[in-house]
Amino acid sequence: LQQFALGAAGGYTGRDAHLAFTTHLLECFGWKDGRPEGAEIPRLLAIADGGKHVEREVALWWAERRTLMEVAAHDAVLDFAWKDLVRVCLQLDPIPQYVVLTNQRDLQLYDLARDREAPRLAIRIDDLPRYSEAFPFFTKEWTPGAVPKIVNVEKVSEEVADLVARLYRSVHAEHTGREKDVIRFTLQCITAMFAEDIGLLPKNYFTSLLYNGAKSGDIERRLGELFTQMNTADLPAPRVVPYFNGGLFTDVVTLRLGDTQVRALTKAAEANWTYVDPHIFGSVFQGIMNDAERHASGAHYTAHDDIMRVVGPTIVEPWRKRIQVAASLKELTELRKQLFAFRVLDPACGSGNFLYVAFRELYRLDTELLSRMREFPSTAGKLSWNGGISTVNFYGIDINPFAVELAKVTLNIAKKIAFEERKAQAFALAGQVEMDIDPSLPLDNLDKNIVCADALFMDWPEVDAIVGNPPFLSGTKIRGELGDEYLQRMLEGFPSIEGRTDLCAYWFQRAHDRLSDSGKAGLVGTSGIRVGKTREASLDYIVEHGGTITNAVSSRVWPGESSVDVSMVNWVRGPADGPHPLIVDGETFLVDRIPTHLQLHADASETKDIVANAAGMAEGVSFGHAAFRSGGPKGFSLAPVRGKPFIRPVATGDDLLRGRLGTEPDYCIDLSSCLTEGEAKAAGGEAFDHLREHVYATVKGRADSGKETDHYKSWLRYWWKPHWGREEFFASVKDRSRLLVCPKVSSRSAFAFVSKLFVPTDTMKVFAFDDDYSFGVMQSRLHWEWTKAKGSRVRADIQYTVAVWRTLPWPQDPTDEQVGAVGGASQKLRQVRADLMEQNGWSLRALYQAAEVEGPHPLKDAQTELDEAVTAAYGMPPNQSPTTFLLELNQLVAEDEEQARKVRGPGLPEHLDPNDPRWTSADCIEPPKVEN
């Protein structure tokens, strides 16, 4: 497996790469030629997809063992590839239990008997040897029911991280004023705990010290002696504790520990740090910072997969390509010389995760390079596996002193882990080899490499590659979080940046300015780098100043605690040959040029507002206080007032998707028709008293507080009404027979007609149309593509914004027949939805999820019929993308308006009567009947 992992690192290439990968892997488990009896390699499966019967090949199908394996493309995102593969698995008989999914770089193991969404194991291919027991179904000795043995590295890491973080906070609270000492003491302990489990200290040396110290009551003395020995180079033989120093142990720190702190430290030491992912340092760092510190700095922990989306294209892939194409020993020797001189900077390094991964990957590349050199007979008996990448070629900057010290420890730990991996790989390739004494000690002094400073206002070192994850902080929050003085300093230091620009854009611009010709960079930024002022200051700036985007992930939900949607961009200063990978919605596309808006469709940022669309849409009611709604600690009791005319059902986006509107909606007190307090009291009775007790008290208090005074003083004049009732809009639709609504935030297009009895909340968008034609246009694929292009993102979902509506051009010349076709298709779609939900007990959300997972589906057929009708009404050419077409139409309609030419706005064409049943049906979601 060691040899296989090393060989697979470069990726199997060619037409049958997936077969070579599969058979070579199975050879490692003892199968001759990698083809066990009963295993079909490959297997062509007949499945249903999108309403059609298609054939799909997988690398391996072993029916007897219910095991399937898929080798995806090398650049595939496994999380997204799984969404497609699981649909295939669920159509097989028998359904596989174990599914191995890999892109030859990462590997995920799924156990469908346990979980169909999350993998039981997710590792790098390099780590296969450590996890061989997780694949008993590949072995000759396998027996049915054998359970994979999997060490949950993530769980172990999180538990240890929590213990260390609690220790730090506790010690810090008791030793106020000694922050630097607390940091150093914590890091000295972390280093010692790693050291005793990875071979830098005798096994269990530190843990035993804690046991004995707890018994004798002298832990502080024992720790002081240990750290002093780790700092002393010339101890007499025989030496048990090796020399560490590296700057960390120059000043030995010991602190008084209470019983609780000793228990926490001992518990952490008892963990097997061999299974602690060094990314734990990021978790430790994040756990140590309190929420306020993390929010102000915008710091967030970055997962390994996300780091590789940057380190891979910027560092690993260019070097691997050079190693693979080198044709002579002389070329390889020169490459190794250049590799040893390669320098990397993370200008927002945090706890050093990017630097750690970059170091490990470059060390592995050096091992690959050595294995290539072994191909030449002249190296026989002469090739040395000694040497390796030096940590002093890695640089980091961060404003947090703890993070800086942690990053230094992280890199020094990386050196030991990389050396042990090299030793195992060398033995697998060449048998017993001579290697120098472990170079991991003494630790490298990285005080000049990784510094505590503000990266925006210091000189960056000259490097070959810049990678990292700059702070996530919206441009609208910079002043409030960092202060006026800091913002002014930023604007003076970056005169080309204007407006409310996200903080990460400053790092993008600074990184590009610091790159030399052909220098490479890869950064993670907020998705704001794709639009507006932030895009102008970052990606537009890079391209306008000679940069070429070479690889990008348009949008990815941040996997950590932060509710942030991110983009990942890699670029080079200078030209770069294509095609270039662009990942959009989890799918990789190869394009000649990656545009700065990081999308396949045309750039929709230059659209114009259409005057005809100025009205017709509003957000639902913003109550402003929980007392208006039923339920909850401040909500009113429904029973005494049920059936009263001022009690109305509430429509929320979530309840629409969950199917609750017709069965169990919430209710609200609606006294908005009352013009005076007296009218409201007479109409509402005890409901009015409830509002007075809760709403009036809050509004009056805020109005008198001096904070937000104008807003609350205005509301105080009509406090019995919702603070934003959209009364003008709802007055404009009083003659409509029903309301057209959609959730404000959703993962898919989900429009519906609801009864006018409902009060839609601000989780809904409400449209002033009740005809079937308007529903059809809004529910169409064209409109959804426009929504994705113009709307904003809330994690993985799309938010319907004013910009979507005001720029959407409607069909300009539909015939009556085309209008009728759209209306008929929209009625059919709603009927199909209603029938399927009733037959299966599904909510609207469950219905759409079922349609996505299964093959042929009536809902898909109905949606396709509607889309074809809407496309015909628009007159869209068959070979044009919806976004490009609508963008061009937007420009034409806006130009017609500027020239005072007549345009057709939203809704049914003017010459058609909306009361005519040919255009307007009557179906809608009704609330449950309520007895007075």
Image: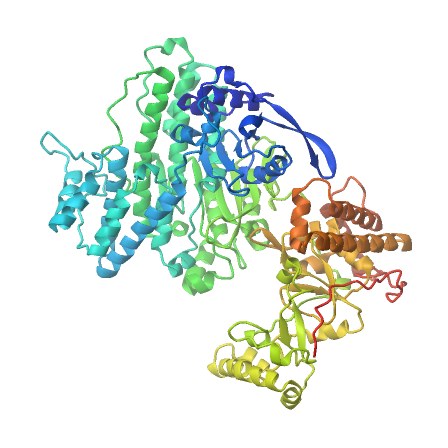
As drawn, the residue found furthest toward the left would be: 236
Image position of 899 with respect to 360: above or below? below
Residue 116 spot, x, y in % from top left: 55, 42
- Residue 303 appears left or right of 443: right
Instruction: Locate residue 816, reporting x and y percent.
Output: 90, 55
Residue found at the very far top of the displayed protein? 377
Residue projecting furthest to the front: 144
Q: In which quarter of the image is residue 191?
A: top left
* Res. 224 in view: no
- Return the residue nearer the eye: 586 or 69: 69
Quarter of the image for the N terminus: give it: top left
Residue at horizontal 53 percent and vertical 84 percent from the top: 693
Q: Does the rendering let one see residue 337?
A: yes
Instruction: Kindly identify the residue that appears in the image at 45 percent across and 49 percent down.
Output: 470
Q: Compared to 632, does 345 lie above or below?
A: above
Rendering coords of residue 536 (x, y %):
57, 50
Q: Say left or right for 872 vs 449.
A: right
Q: Nearer the viewer, residue 812 or 912?
A: 912
Location of the C terminus by quadrant is: bottom right
Q: In which quarter of the image is residue 222?
A: top left
- Number of numbered discs present? 0
